[in-house]
Image: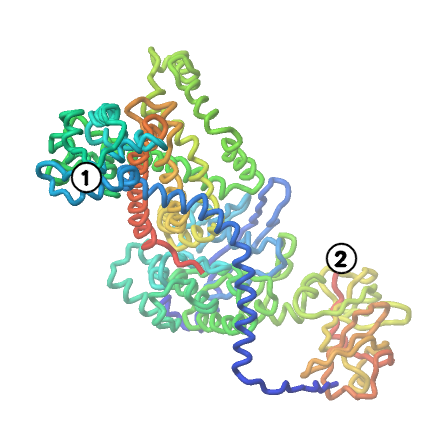
Amino acid sequence: MPNNKTSETSHSASPLVRFEAVQKTFDGENLVVKDLNLTINQGEFVTLLGPSGSGKTTCLMMLAGFEVPTNGDIYLGTQRLNSVPPHKRNFGMVFQNYALFPHMTVEENIRYPLKTRKMPVAEADRKVAEILDMIKLGEFARRRPTQLSGGQQQRVALARALVFEPQLILMDEPLGALDKQLREHMQLEIKQLHEQLGLTVVFVTHDQSEALTMSDRVAVFDDGIIQQIDTPSNLYEYPANAFVAQFIGENNTLPGRIESVEGRQCRVNFGEGLNTGALIGPNLRAGDATRLSIRPERIKLNGASRQLPNRLQARVREFIYLGDHLRVRCEVAGNDDFVARVPVDDFTSSMQSGDVVELGWRDEDVRALDAS
Amino acid sequence: MTTTIAASESPPRPAGTLKAQLRRAERLRKWKAFGLVAPLALFLIVVFVMPIGSMLWRSVDNSELESVMPLTTAGLQRWDGTGLPDESTMAAFAEELRDSRQGGGLGRIGRRLNYEDTQYRSLLMRTLRGLPASIDADDNWTATLIEIDEAWGETATWLGIQRAAPPTTDRYLLASVDLERGESGQIQRISEGDRLYQTVFQRTMVIAGGVTLICLALGFPLAYLLATLPAKTSNLLMIFVLLPFWTSLLVRTAAWIILLQSNGLVNQSLIATGVIDSPLQLVFNRIGVFFAMVHILLPFMVLPLYSVMKGISPSYQRAAVSLGAHPFAAFWQVYVPQTVSGIAAGTILVFIMALGYYITPALVGGPADQMVSYYVAYYTNSTNNWGMAAALGSILLVVTLMLYLVYHRLVNRKQLIRS
């Protein structure tokens, strides 16, 4: 089994991989990765999250050795990785479409990394049997990958990347090809493996819920820069800028101007006679333009809003019934797409679209972020 | 917030009608499909199946004598081969020989009998001239014939005709592999000086196989390059691959003669650069044949390889490298096996096309580079010996099919199971 570390040691802070001022350009004009500084600790599950073209996959490929950094260095422990060819890096990699070799059986696929390492046959047999057992595909050993379902192929790809006990597992959108239910199931399975085996994982995805579900830390990429790297809860609750707030989870934004600042608190004017308290984001001062970010589930409606310091009236545009909750789309300060997520209990059937409702929220549920 | 959907239940139907409906719907579809392929099927039957069938038949067809002299052949079949045939056979022979002048029958049996012995045609002509004008029922035809030519009194003469009489024969097929029937009907090799076709078949296989291997060696890297380059560049290069198709085969072959001849471009450049002192013999020999045939057949190797390689994701090789394989090993163990179907298609296509090459070796090859097709053309065009032409063709067809089956087995074992 890959290093039998317990989960206690998996969060120890000994750095395994370091990116230092890494830049990458393909055409000599545009930097795909602008200035990457990233440390990945031993036993950590780090996700690189971002829209397509944000540079996250390029980072992974540089780590895997398939792309060479234009500038900067990548270290594994104390070893500089830049000049190590990919086949000597000893990283397990899971590809987007699994890249299982179609001319080999499941068993031959999993044995391949052991064969390249010239492991004695008896030992390789044992390891392959063990890992087949772990992914519960023992009976499929003689099948070809194309005869397996997507989820099974995914497991084989995982087994192939794990069987040689690499010090680092790289995953490039490995769940992209699966349907929603299977994807959520595999997320948990990968997460469990990570904890059981104490793996260090670098995971690339563009699916924010996947990133939040699985990761110890998430690096949000945009435009070749890490916009924020933090734990999932911090990313959601304390986004560093408007991009992160918008990219992670659902978000309402309102443009405004900061009137006064008091420690972490500030007051923001966002329209004629409309004021709210907010937590101030980084690099903002009184007088700056800002964008307010409010999560839909933090907005209270009518009766529930009565005790809250920030209240306003809004016209309902639409009710959307979703079973466990109700989405109320209203118009607030000219924003036609302001969504509140309220429990079904708060809904009375006398409400109709076009009605005026009272909305309210607490100061600490609002972030004043950069205006760009 | 909830809506009730009124579900309407259809009345139960007997199971039989549903099946019948399905059959009816399917039948219509089948007829449509059949209607769409019918013109092509008809075309194939008329221009492909029938000619090949008739060619195969011609290689064993021996009906000349039987069609011109039905009574004589019937009589000779009864004859035990000792002494002379009986009087009724002689009479039938004389009568049918005289009638054979109409409708070109005489020419056909003359040609056919000459394959047995070159004396027969003139013997028949002499006999025909000597035959009496009127037929008398009481005439002794045995005596009359011997009177006209003594040869009719020899058993061997009649044995020759008997050998040529059956409606089918294996003599063409045997001759195509340098075999013949001996005096007592046993199969034996023909005398050493006359042997030709075993060498020709061997040569055909060697040239076709050599051309295929050279095409594979040149085509594989080219197809790989085309498949891995960005689309813009590879499209441009693809035009160059297809460029030869824009000119006629004859023109391209003639161009090679001009390029490769003693004072041609290639030799002159080599002499000018001091690589050689005297011109190399590059054309009208095996080298010229290989040059021209590889040039013409290369696209047929590149295209199937390219189409297969285009479908192989580069992530396979990356995966192999990430699993610790050296890039060369990754290419050899992971990429090449996935191109097997392309290699199979390309090699079989080139090999089979090369087997049938006629014009190119005829123009740029020497006498020792002529392939089977040359002899097929020779027999059809020059000597009108359709039996030999068909037999050579049939043997080539059978050998090709056998090679294909062996090859198919080998490749299929390695073939990937594609979803």
- Name the chain under label 1: B
Most foreground residue, B223 or A161:
B223
To which quarter of the image does residue B354 belong? top left
Callout 1: few (<14), some (14-19), or many (20+) C-alpha neighbours within 10 Å? many
Q: Please, what secondary structure does the residue beneath circle 1 have?
A: helix
Give the residue displayed 86% in from the left and 69% down from the top: A333
- State the residue position of label 1: B89
The Cα–Cα distance between marks 2 and 1, rounded to whole angstroms, is: 114 Å
Give the residue displayed 25% in from the left and 37% down from the top: B172
Cβ–Cβ under 8 Å for marks 2 and 1:
no
Q: Quadrant of the N terminus of chain B?
A: bottom right
- State the residue position of label 2: A372
Q: Is residue A283 above or below residue A152?
A: above
Q: Which mark is residue A363?
A: none
Q: Is residue A162 visible?
A: yes
Q: Is residue A133 left or right of residue B1?
A: left
Q: Please, what secondary structure does the residue beneath circle 2 have?
A: loop
Q: Is residue B255 above or below residue A185?
A: above
Q: Amino acid at mark 1?
A: Thr
- Name the chain under label 2: A
Residue A185 % position (x, y): 51, 74
Callout 2: few (<14), some (14-19), or many (20+) C-alpha neighbours within 10 Å? few
Residue B276 % position (x, y): 34, 14
Most foreground residue, B152 or A239:
B152
